[in-house]
Amino acid sequence: MKVRIRCEDKYESQKLASLIFIKDSKETYISKILNVIENEVIIELKDKSAHSVLFKDKIQGEKFTDFLQSVMEKEHEIISTEILDQDVEIVKS
């Protein structure tokens, strides 16, 4: 399964991709969604740190949280992320 999420700008897309998945260790760092406020999603990483990511709009934020839900529930795993300017393409198995 694959989804393409649009962030507010290129910086946010780079930040999101780096927070989601590290290719070398093939590990997903996000442990849970702490809050969703309009187009902002606050995530918690495995190290217990919290980070904010700004999406283009509320719909993109909801699309991201819906897609990531099965990963956090250990039903799927993130296989790859790719930055395409403002967009991040996320693939899960």
Image: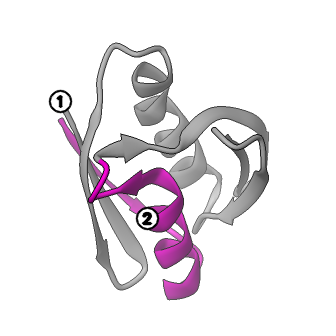
Mark 1 belongs to which amino acid?
Answer: Ser
Above or below, 37 relative to 53? above
Q: Is residue 60 left or right of residue 5?
A: right
Q: Residue at x 69, y 45 (%)?
A: 43
Instruction: Assess whether residue 19 is covered by the magenta stretch.
Output: yes
User: Which mark, residue 93?
Assistant: 1
Mark number displayed over residue 32? none
Looking at the image, which is closer to me, 65 or 81? 81
Q: Is residue 80 left or right of residue 64?
A: left
What is the basis of the colouring in this image?
one colour
Mark 1 crowd level (few <14, some 14–19, many ≥20, 10 Å Cα): few
Residue drawn where x is 70% and y is 57% of the image: 39
52 lies left or right of 29: right
**Hey, what amino acid is under mark 2?**
Ala
Pointer 2 residue: 17
Q: Is residue 4 magenta?
A: yes
Picture quadrant where residue 8 is located:
bottom right
Q: Earlier in the sequence, mark 1 or mark 2?
A: 2
Q: Give the residue at the far front of this rendering.
A: 25
Q: Position of residue 42 (x, y in %)?
A: 75, 49
Q: Which residues are magenta?
A: 1-25
Label 2: how many Cα within 10 Å (few below 14, some 14–19, many 20+)? some
Residue 70 percent across, percent down from the top left: 41, 20
Q: In the rendered image of this protein, does residue 48 appear above or below residue 71?
A: below
Quarter of the image that includes the C terminus:
top left
Residue 58 appears at what percent x and percent y? Answer: 65, 52
Give the percent coordinates (x, y) of residue 31.
60, 32
Q: Secondary structure at mark 1?
A: loop
Cα separation, mark 1 vs mark 2, equals: 17 Å
Disc 1 and disc 2 in contact, CB within 8 angstroms: no
At horizontal 55% and vertical 72% (from top left) the residue drawn is: 15
